[in-house]
Amino acid sequence: MIYDVAAIRAQFPGLKRMQNGEPAVFFDNPAGTQMAQQAIDRMVWAMTEVNANLGGQFETSILAGKLVDDAHEAAKDFINARSVEEIVFGQNMTTLTFMMSRVLGRELKAGDEIVVSRMDHDGNVTPWMIMAEERGLTLKWLDFSPETFEFDIAQVGNIVTDRTRLVAVGYASNVTGTINNVKAIAAAAKAASNGKALVYVDAVQFAPHGVIDVQDIGCDFLVCSAYKFYGPHYGLLWGRQEHLERLTAYKVRAATEELPSKFVTGTTNREELAGIMGAIEYYEWLGRNFGGAIMPTLTRRQRIVAGVEAMLRHDHALADRLIVGLKQVKNVRIMGIADRAAFSRRVPTVSFAMEGCDPTEIAKFMASQGIYVWDGHNYGVEPVTRLGLIDKGGVVRVGPTHYNTPGEIDRFLGALNVYLQRR
């Protein structure tokens, strides 16, 4: 089926924004995508048609409870969990990770080891660093190559020991764009620790660009944020049911011990859950319209996968056009995999630095042209430090996604050349 980017863009009302008489170019997607119409409609529906707290005997409360159940079912299919009892919703990936660091920290003692990564967003680093400091744990680092922008999986076996109790790693980097082989990392960590290490995966940057299958990865926890995959500002965490049942939740006395509600603090945010459900329904729409998933016998999971696969072909084409164009700009250093043959190991997020150019000034110029990009470390404190750029303003980050167009890539490259000519 022909990929119709105009039809896809029509599903995102935010893309109608105009600036300087032209459509704005949204390349800020790694920090937050535009919301799909399906997600917006679901949120409005939740706030107008089923707006009641849970547990009541009346119709709107009963319907609100069904909404919560349906959202858990949709999230289960999105990441291929075994059960809705393995799904925990929360404010965002960072908040959920801070919660889990407190929960998991209760089981650790001085001398235990945890491993974090030099490539990760700070949301998957600082919570564990604080836990290590508070519990007297030994903190170890999994490094990456600043030349290849990838991990050496063999190093996992050298770092992890039978004292290791946690390995935290990102699925895809919000700086380098690298897709990490988290399945191989999880297997290596389990083998080197004699099965004692839990593996915690941050999938925030991967979720908008790939198929998540927690049963295949072999990790113990995985977390992502819906506002990075076309939904509202809310997050979801998956954990193996045996872990979630065993662990102690920090909650009020009146709250239930039953999963999946055990780790939910306070009133469930039903409109956000509706928005997440709508975002997943958008993936299904993509699968039906551009992934060939039109047979009524297909499962929701199959439609989601078909939608993601349709996205990916377009993602790779955009990344190729962007990287080829940047390579033609003098003094540009691309901070990620630039080999077309290796694009299966990266998301389309592309960061770069230019000798003598301030990333903030480039981002400001782009903003004046109606092109939205990010600059700085983007909370990737560790990778930007490892790349030697933390004291040089960080990087310029350009993050196309499946609703962007080749013409928008060309606009960015043209604007970059104009900026350089005016310097």
Image (spheres, rainbow, N blue to C red):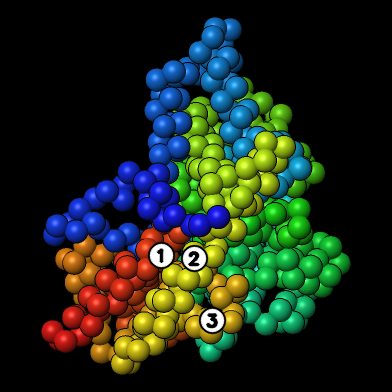
Do the residues under discs 1 and 2 have CB atoms within 8 angstroms? yes
What amino acid is labelled 1 in the image?
A: Pro
- The residue furthest right is 194
Assign a secondary structure to mark 1: loop
- In the picture of the structure, the residue carrying the numbered disc 2 is 315
> Which residue does the image show at 32% across and 88% down from the upper left?
329
* Crowd around label 3: few <14 · some 14–19 · many ≥20 (10 Å): some
- In the picture of the structure, the residue carrying the numbered disc 3 is 340
- In the picture of the structure, the residue carrying the numbered disc 1 is 400
How many numbered discs, if any? 3
Drawn side of residue 310 relative to residue 16, left or right: right
* Crowd around label 2: few <14 · some 14–19 · many ≥20 (10 Å): many
* Circle nearer the N terminus (2, 3): 2
Specify the quadrant of the image occupied by residue 216.
bottom right
The correct choice, above or below, for 345 with respect to 60 in the image is: below
The residues tagged by marks 3 and 1 sit, at their Cα atoms, a distance apart of: 16 Å
Whether residue 101 is visible here, answered yes or no, is: no
> Which residue does the image show at 61% across and 29% down from the upper left?
70
Specify the quadrant of the image occupied by residue 193.
bottom right
Drawn side of residue 369 relative to residue 167, left or right: left
